Image: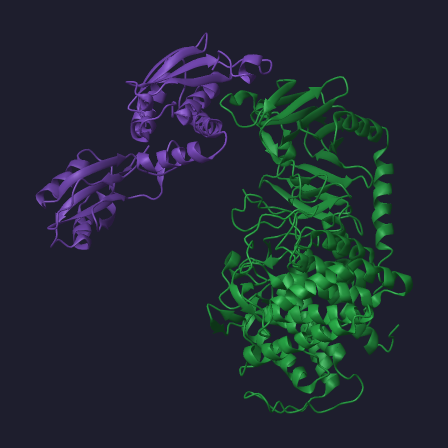
Chain colours: A green, B purple
Amino acid sequence: MIKQPNVILGNDELLVTMGKKGDIIGFFYPRRDHAQHVEESLACIHTGERLLWTNDNEWNGIQNYVEDTNIVSTKLYHDSGIRISILDLVHPDVPVLIRRFKIQSQKKLSGKFFYYSNFNVGETSKKNSGFCDIDTHLLVQYWQNYHIGIYSQPEFTEWQIGKAMDTIWWTNSKYDMEDGKLQRNKEDIGNINNAAGWDLDLEADGANEFVILIGAASSRRLLYKRMQELSKLPLEYIFEKTREHWVMWLSRKQVIKIPGLEEYDNLRQELFNAYNRALLMLYLLNDREYGSFVAAPEFDSNFEKCGGYGFCWNRDAAEIVLALKHSGYPEYCDMFFKWCIQTQLSDGSWFQRYWLNGDIAPSWGNFEYSTQIDETGSTLYAMDVYYRILEGLKKAEFLEEVWVSVLRAAEYLMKRTKSGIHESCMDLWETYYGIFTYTNASIYAGLMGASHLAEENGEAGMARRWKKRAEFIKQATIDRFWLQEGYFAKGVINEKLDKTIDASILGTYVPFGMLSPKDPIEKDMIQFMIDNIQKKLSVPVNRGYGIKRYENDSYINGNPWIVTTLWLSEAMFAFALDLPYEKASFAPTLSTHENSYEKEENPEEEVKTLTNEGIKCLKWALAGATSTGLLPEQVDQSTGNPAWAIPLGWSGSLILNNILLLDKICRRKAGNSE
Amino acid sequence: MVRDLFTFAGFNENSQIVWFKIIYSKEPGSLSLITDFLEKKNAFIMFGHLDNITQKTGEYSVFTELNKDVDPEDFALKIKELEVVNEVEYGISEYGMVYSVDFPLNVIGVRGVMARALTIVDIIKTLNQSAPHAEGLLTISGLKGGTHAAKYFKSILDLNDSNFANMLAELFKGVGWGILEIECDPRTYEGRIIVKDSFIADVYGESDQPVCAFMSGYFAGYLTEYFGKNISVREVSCKATGKEFCEHIISPAPSGGTSQEYQLRGEMR
């Protein structure tokens, strides 16, 4: 069953995803993509009469992060007057989730507090083994070298290890809680679950606290040691240490000011929050050992309704590391490009997607015709962007490190673009085979980047050759795909020009810069694209408009996407910044295009309009976030709720880019361009 | 259990199936007045259902077969003109296949549905073929249904040692799941249930393994809820494996944790 999280938390080794009511959905250790050890893990209360599961509809909940941290607060209210306050944090140094449950009741309550878990240790329900060590009060489940343990303060007084799905149903821990007492079976094997129990006796308006530690380790000994050491530390100390860890990490960020947004109520504060949240979220999607990122924490591992998201795509990761670099965290570029060097295929390209350790992931792009050439283009482009901001010795070292990889990738792109447009492959949305505007733009940017790096490396001949091809691609793309309607066609599908408008054509401007506003004709082309995308792909929801990927999109109901909406606003902000700031001028005539028009423009007015329109997109995106501020991939067009992959790294990188660009615009306007 | 539901055996082009829901005053002979009127007007009564709503009024739902040329609205008005009748509603079953006056159906206190046995067996079969732990999954699913049935019976009557088995058997027969012969000692919680014409085994087709885990779970849920003690029910013989009928053995579930023989799939299984 697919369950989407509302919040995520973790440290370098552990990633935890949770539902709105504090139920654990995913528990990834030691990597963000593998292994996911939890099927279900949550608390429930036995009132003396019946079980109240904390994820049940009977509870109302409020969930948010403790400001500027990945510490989570969940408050649950039950009609019967029971209130549960959950504080969740992951210790910054060890893979242990610490859950503090504070339970209050308006009425006298004499029952039990249970913590139930159905672990699939090693991401399998098979051949698991579980036991309760009553001397140390540790519940442990393991498979091979994965060990997951539960410890509590106060110590649990009853427990059950039982079969999760079996004909001997009465051993099932989930069932066992229903009569308010556990059978205390100490060990079992197979597909098993467990429960720990405590007496819960509350006077009217009384309260009680239970702290539960859920830890992971590579051996039983290490698990015991971790839990023992942590149990000695006061929760307040761990909380403070964890809070400090996140606040310190955030303190390195590029400072933003965004002055002059007074007319937009609370927008400035919302943007500060969104900026911090995106950074904190991206930290959790990154693999610290390998430098790769999951696109989103996996939530459909059986690929029931999609191809899954718990893998690293070069396309997404290249966007993410550049956004992090612009936000003050350049080390992610370093690590990611090292990973790219390791994962490059023998033909010089990059695969559709990878496991975070660099192994190729399950793919529907195993052949030349089904690969996604844009991922190679994006990677090369990102390498060059990063190189350009480096200085001194670091610059030379980076070039030395990536040069062979650049050479191989560029030659791969040369091989696949002999006619000026790329050979047939799969598009960035991983749906169509053909030739695409977006892919051509990414190849253009990749070859231009490679050309620059070649020049820097003293390879003038190569630089010329690659640049020449890039320019050829640009011209061929414009000649073949630009439509008189004022936008690029999606591409060629089934050997026919597909005139569907697709938001990804924005890639010709942002990020790939194939079109430049410095060129008067191209400037108008950009403007036309922005207008047409806004006009044709807007979907009304949440008192605003989100942008869907393309006309007739049917993936997950054809919802509007955060990615495409923020892509449009990024283009608007970038365009506003590219316009001449002080002096008004006249836009030139687009005489080479049938749909050309002559337009008198006031750049200041244009900047204002673009900025305001961009802000509308930004506000729309923020309205589609979870209650905890995480940006999803999509927004449900009927409910306005966050939809599908949550959180999506690509959405996070785009919000960072947007906020940084808006900050620049606002500062420029305020006459403060520091 | 199932109110005002009609399944038709055939379809006559010259007639129409019309139901009337008649609220009438409960006076001596008032119901006869209504049925006499229907008969006199050549409305062939196919099915009737009486519901004593209050002390003073009653509800009579009747399915009739009328000639095609009879206007049901006009007919309903004529019924309403009878002195003992307060209100009349009517409806037409256009295709004469299956029709219910009230929607949705109600089965032991909650919403019910009708389905072909094969529809359910197809789900069971798909689980058996594709899902890990299918037998456990079906047992647990059945357990919930059986628990509900016992809870419902306890809420409407005094469920006791003399009737708990008969109630279950009546339910199974009523919903078409099978004919039960139950022997169960309430003191030892031991016994067996013979299921003749189990709807699962009947339509499942040949199988090497017993296929009625869902039913075992249902029995276990029912008995556990009734006795207030965990009861194990396992199918030891199944019609789908070529036996004459299905047999489920009842025993108290081991207490104090899982014993080794269960973990290692020993004799108990």
In the image, residue A227 lies at what x, y percent? 79, 29
Q: Based on the displayed image, in which of its 4 quarters is residue A127 positioned?
A: top right
**Could you tell me which residue is drawn at 48 percent across and 21 percent down?**
B225
In the image, residue B219 lies at what x, y percent? 41, 21
Along the line of sight, the residue nearer the viewer: A113 or B181: B181
**Could you tell me which residue is drawn at 71 percent across and 83 percent down?**
A606
Q: How many marks?
A: 0
In the image, residue B224 lies at what x, y percent? 48, 19
**Placement of the C terminus of chain A among the 4 image quadrants:** bottom right
| Outermost front residue | A461
Along the line of sight, the residue nearer the viewer: A476 or B233: A476
Q: Based on the displayed image, in which of its 4 quarters is residue B33 positioned?
A: top left
| Outermost right residue | A392
**Could you tell me which residue is drawn at 79 percent across and 64 percent down?**
A386
A574 in relation to B215, above or below: below
Quick check: A69 left or right of B57? right
**Could you tell me which residue is drawn at 51 percent across and 25 percent down?**
A166
**Placement of the N terminus of chain A among the 4 image quadrants:** top right
Quick check: A246 left or right of A42? right
**Is residue A331 something one can see in this rendering?**
yes
In the image, residue A143 lies at what x, y percent? 66, 29
A615 in relation to A369, above or below: below
B40 in relation to A352, above or below: above
Quick check: A158 left or right of A391? left
Along the line of sight, the residue nearer the viewer: A317 or A50: A317
Q: Based on the displayed image, in which of its 4 quarters is residue A40 positioned?
A: top right
| Outermost top residue | B187
**Is residue B163 something one can see in this rendering?**
no
A517 in relation to A161, above or below: below
